[in-house]
Every structure is written in C-alpha cells, then in structure tokens.
Amino acid sequence: MPDLNKNCAQTVFDIARMQDMTLENLDAPSLVSVPEGFRLEDTEEYQEHRNRFRGRYDTESSKSFAQYVADRKTVDKCFVDKTNLSAMRCQAIFNLGDEEQAGHADDVANLVLPITDEFNALRSLSRVSQAKIVDFIQDYAHCLTFSDQDEDSEQSSNMSFSHALKAFRSVTVKTAKEMTSNVGDLNASKSALERIEADSAIRLPRFVHMTTSLYEDLPEVVVTARVAIITDGDSLGLSLRIVAQQKELNDAAQRFVDLVTDILPKETPIYVGTFQP
C-alpha cells in the first residue's frame, strides 16, 4: 500500500509539473513535454507540414544558382570562398537573420564551379611519358595552339598543329657511354662519362597555348605552358609547365567574385570569405 501511495503521489507531481512547463513559443507548436524525464520531443515529422521552410540547394550552374536566389527573394547574405582553388564556391543564406533576430542559417543555396577538364588535364602534365603528351595533344586539339622561340630572341612564331604533333612523336633518346679504368698497387681510380641527349627529328614547340576557362562558367583565357624534356637514365619524360600558374588561379578566383556580383540581385550583400553559423 505505501508503494501505491508513493506512485500516485509521483504521478500527481509529474502532471502538475507538466502544467508548469507549458511552452509559450507558438512558433514551434510541435514541441511537447512528456512525463519521462521531462524531455522535449519534436513531432514535426508526423505533421502534415513543417514548422518552417529550410533546405539546401546545390548546383554547378551559375545560371541556375542565380535563378534560384532570384525566385526565393529572401536572401540575407552571400559568401564567396575563393581560397580553395580546387573549386570555386559560393553560398547564399536565406534565414541568417541579424544580431537582434538570428535565424537558423539552415536554408541555403550552394554554387560550386569545378575546374574544367581541359585545364585539369594541362595541370597534370608536370612530368609524363611521351605517349601521354601525344594523347593530350590529340584529345584537346580543339583548344591548343603552339609557338616557337629562339633562345637569343624574345620574338615567337606560330607553329602548326600537325608540325607540333609530329615533333612530339619523333622525340628520341641518344646515349653515349665512355669509361676508363686505371688500377695500381695502392690505388684504383675509375671515371665514367654518361651523356644522354634528347633529340627530335623535327623542332619541338617551345610553348603550348590552351584557350579555356579555368573553372566552369568563367570566361575563357589563354593559358601558356613551357615545353621541357626530362631525361633520367635511358628514360625520357616530357613536361608542360604552366607559366605563372598561381597568378592564373588567383585571377580566375577574382573573375568568380565578379561573376557572382553580376548574376545576383544588386541589393544582395556579398562577402569574400566563408561563414560558419
């Protein structure tokens, strides 16, 4: 009998306490208090409608991103991240609010512009085989041009595609080895001379020029790469080293900022950097 009275008393106490914990936040009617531990349970998933609109929109199209932001008409702020050069990123937040009425910042749209296939292929040619260079030239013939330049002159001359392709195909390695050896009673000496020469029956271009955008949806530019031959033992390697690559990437990042500024409504606050709510 004492246990029954104790349980009844606890139940009455719990009910009374529940009344004291009545929520006054009418904007979140799905939050209710339950007796066990007085935990807050969210029943929003069982309702016909959500308490508020929220979600994340992701796209790689600047046109679609601009259309989505314009259709929403409620963008609070936009943040442009140009520090991660593997891709250009921008985030628009629709419920960020302000210092007086802060929002949840969980209603966002993300724009990500990846590096183009053409520029990514050029970046990967720091040291590759002769066959891979030839494949690259054939695969991206639509956006490549070539030029030559004498070492004693700053003037360059254009080279035809067929001439450049034949030149890369005809590169060979010549090896000459000369060794002498002298052995005495108390000493021994040996000298060896290894000479490796990379040569081509047809003159190689000095520069390769690619007309491409560095990131999707950005304007096209001309990226220049210097041709170099790398020898290691009897093996031959070729290199296309992008001239001032870091500057090209930084310039592309600024063009991305300009693009975002142009496609979004003029009243949209735009900040360069990232924001963590």
Image: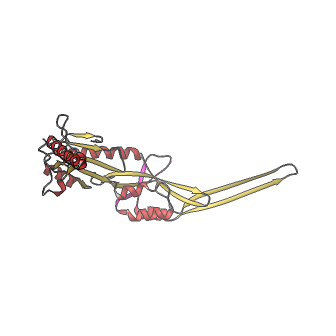
- Residue drawn at the location 19% of the way across and 45% of the way down: 9
Report whether 273 appears left or right of 190.
Answer: left
Give the position of the C terminus as an image quadrant: top left
Rendering quarter of residue 135: bottom left
Could you tell me how many numbered marks the image carries? 0
Q: Identify the image quadrant of residue 78.
A: top left
Residue 148 painted magenta: yes
Nearer-the-camera pick, 212 or 205: 212
Against 132, is 256 above or below?
above
Looking at this view, name the residue that lies furthest to the left.
26
Residue 97 in the image: state x and y as whole percent.
18, 40
Q: Where is residue 50 in the image (x, y as percent from the top left)?
A: 15, 53
Quick one: 124 or 234, which is closer to the camera?
Answer: 124
Q: Is residue 158 visible?
A: no
Q: Give the range drawn in magenta.
A: 142-160
Residue 139 seen in the current view: yes
Residue that protrudes farthest toward the front in the picture: 1
Q: Residue at x 37, y 55 (%)?
A: 119
